Amino acid sequence: MTKWVYNFGGGSAEGDTSMKNLLGGKGANLAEMASLGLPVPPGFTLSTDVCTYYYDHGETYPEDMNDQIAGGLKEIEKLTGKKFGEASNPLLVSVRSGARASMPGMMDTVLNLGLNDETVEGLAELSGDRRFALDSYRRFITMYSDVVLGVHHHIYEDILENHKDTQGYMLDTEMTAMDWDSVIKEFKAATKRELGKDFPQDPMEQLNGAVDAVFGSWMNERAIVYRRLNDIPAAWGTAVNVQAMVFGNMGDTSATGVAFTRDPSTGENRYYGEFLINAQGEDVVAGIRTPQTLTKASREKMEEDLPSMEEALPEAYAQLADTFETLEAHYRDMQDIEFTVEEGTLWMLQTRTGKRTAKAALKIAVDMAEDGQITTDEALLRLEPASLDQLLHPTLKPDAERDMIAMGLPASPGAAIGEVVFNSDEAEALKKAGHKVILVRVETSPEDIHGMHAAEAIVTARGGMTSHAAVVARGMGRPCVSGAGEIRIDYKAESLTVMGRTVKKGETVTVDGGTGQVFLGAVEMQQPELSGDFAKVMKWADEARKLGIRTNAETPLDVQTAKDFGAEGIGLCRTEHMFFEADRLGYFREMILAEDKEDREAALAKILPVQRDDFAAIFRIMEDRPCTIRLLDPPLHEFLPHSEADIESVAKSLGVPAGELMHRANDLQESNPMLGHRGCRLGISYPEIYEMQARAIFEAQKLVSEENGATPVAEIMVPLVSSAKELEILKGKIDAIAKEVGALEYTIGTMIELPRAALRAADIAEYAEFFSFGTNDLTQTTFGLSRDDAGRFLPDYVNQGIMEKDPFVTLDQDGVGDLIHIAAERGRTTRESIKLGICGEHGGDPASVEFCHRAGLDYVSCSPYRVPIARLAAAQAAIKTK
């Protein structure tokens, strides 16, 4: 018989963290905490295998599952002394999801399950608090109706708000037992009105419905979007955890909260969290009530009046602090914890590795490594390379002018500028149209996940430091200000009002998630500081990695930025970018319009000095680091104007008839220029272009060498080679220029970007001293896809599982990767010492960097701001293959 149900509680469990894939993160950690002897309410986990079975068998369950659920309930009853469905001594349970990867708020939860018109009276009798029992019942009706029955929660919220208005109440805690009795009657009437049937009274029917809903929520829209954004496979499935309820809403000695063993925003080694007295868990994360701080120090720092948990519930807090130490020492990482205090007794509901900002991740990893809790290799593996991007961009300049319009909680650090939007769909649409947006909401919900991802930053009027907006924003690396209570949002008018000022949709604001401030207009930014923890991690990464890291850059600013970020050379200098500069584009057009070689050379002679100066500027910055310079690659028609007005203007500046310019432009036009007269084919047709570029490189090299004594290393790359003969001819011409100029240190190689070049690599290596894989074009020519157009339909391929990922973002290891393996192997059979690297955008993608390490390449090259990402990814690849 297949085991579908795993019990935990009472100091033992049928699982542990090694079974995370089967029990999900929540279930595995509940089992682990129970085994550690921590106070965990007993329960059982329906494994992820049930979810897989459910979707593989037309949303049905294994025949023997119900019997195992019954056995799980009996075990909970035995440990609690309560009976599920019994009126006099009712067992109530929570039903929660639990995938192996944390997906906060994306799937459904039901609390207080087992309550009905009879068991609520038993709960009132047992607790001696009828108000508490009815409060729990109304919560259950609202949550179950929304999650399981499909009746929107706002229907119940409206009923409650109307009742509070009638009674003159501001808070739910002012409601009496009589009030809740009246509201519950209205709730049940609303359910019957919406569904045509009564709210279910049978606890077993309730449990089955909740399990259905949680498994069903694995495929809801927000969960699908979250998985896509976070690379979580749908095949993993979710587990379902059924657990005895404990109550934080039993009066002033009861509470519920969310806590972190360290600060998830900064990484400081201090307890961080929030709690609410006389509340249940959803009250904290939903942002409905403003929570209180966990520690006295935090309360004083935040200048808040309400007592911290340390002050209000000192005994429970002391037990919680001990539990923090136990869990962090056991898991050797910062933990995110959910807890409940029931009449002074602490219960642990969840622990998981806490989501954190990139800054916090760095600090926690460094601190734990330096304290000896983990090794430096473990510290490196705990960091998400792509998250470093959060640290590499500007922040607000301290002395910049600013006009603050709102203040909230600093929920997720970082700064961003954008135009205000109030709707997640609109945020996503504007992002696709090239806008930078700031999403402003009263509070976010899981349905806002796509808008939050599209936004530069998020601002909410309600919610605390552990609200949905805060947790998700930190995980995404988005700046977030939550609980900006002075903001009044009018969704209909698409505006917000604060302190008598109105900000309309489309107006620019600046958000500082590190201070919790929102400013009108754009505030001046400053460059990041890359010392401290960042520098330590980069040093450890450089010691661990085998791959060299270079950059794709051709402007002095980009070259200097990349060097500051640790680039060890240039892997791709695209010389055509230099021709587009205003002071030489006219000369280049003259060359294109020239009728013979003599005229072309005359035009190129005008370009030579400025191109030489360009290369000299790069060599000065890179000193003796290798610089791979790609000779002219794009087709010539790209340099000519296309509209009639532009042709008229350019013809006038060049002193040629407009008709002649138009005729030449038409002559050069190609049906498929990406596969046409470009790259080395231009060098074959017009060798004087490549000869001029080679001369400029060698003269710049000599000039810089004479200036500072360091010899720049020039690697001249011939693009789009498909046969050895092309490279043989062009290499001969470059060598002749080198001899004429008296060139210093240089090598000649080629960019492998055509399948034929990969297959004929043994021949090409006779003339190439290095191969640089141009994975952008190699992907295009291997798939027969246009990178510029494929974005329209590639999402369909990814969504339907035809492709795991967009091959222009993450290297296709099966097809394109095979060609790289073939070229590397065949190239080395001819020239054992041939240098191998990649210079497409894949050079900054962690998964692609890992492939390059395993393939035995010498280096990867990427854009300047991705150099630290590549350094860390290369280190992780080396550690994984030790």
Image (cartoon, rainbow, N blue to C red):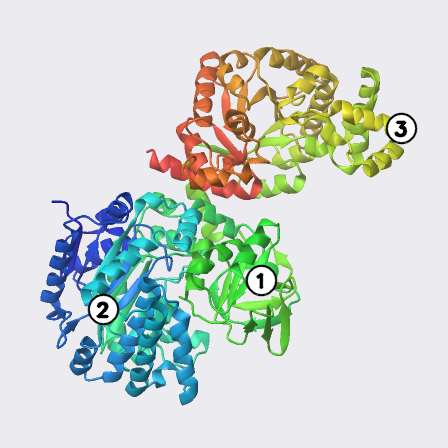
Image quarter in which the C terminus is found: top left
Q: Secondary structure at mark 1?
A: strand
Residue 857 - label: none
Image point (41%, 48%), residue name: 230
Disc 3 secondary structure class = loop
Compared with 740, 701 (above or below) is: below
Quadrant where the image shows the N terminus: top left
* Horizontal side of residue 204 vs 231, given as left or right: left
> Residue 768's quadrant in the figure?
top right
Q: Is residue 389 visible?
A: yes
Q: Quick one: label 1, few (<14), some, or many (20+) residues within 10 Å? A: many
Q: CA distance from mark 1 to mark 3?
A: 50 Å
Disc on res. 347 = 2
Query: From the viewer's perspective, is residue 826 above or below residue 375?
Result: above
Find disc 3 in the rendering and name its residue.
Answer: 656
Disc 2 secondary structure class: strand
Q: Earlier in the sequence, mark 2 or mark 3?
A: 2
Query: Within 10 angstroms of label 3, few (less than 14), some, or many (20 or more) residues?
Result: some
Task: Give the x, y percent position of residue 507.
Answer: 65, 64
Residue tagged by mark 1?
421
Q: Where does the image place residue 462, in percent across and percent down from the top left?
A: 47, 72
Alpha carbon distance from label 1 to label 2? 41 Å
Q: Residue at x 56, y 72 (%)?
A: 490
Above or below, comparing residue 618 to residue 727 in the picture: below
Mark 2 surroundings: few (<14), some (14-19) or many (≥20) residues within 10 A: many
Mark 1 and 3 residues: CB-CB less than 8 Å, in contact?
A: no
Which three-letter amino acid code belongs to the residue tagged 3? Val
Give the percent coordinates (x, y) of residue 647: 83, 34
Q: Nearer the viewer, mark 2 or mark 3?
A: 3
The residue type indicated by label 1 comes to Val
Q: Name the amino acid type tagged 2.
A: Trp
Say whether disc 1 or disc 3 marks the residue closer to the N-terminus: 1
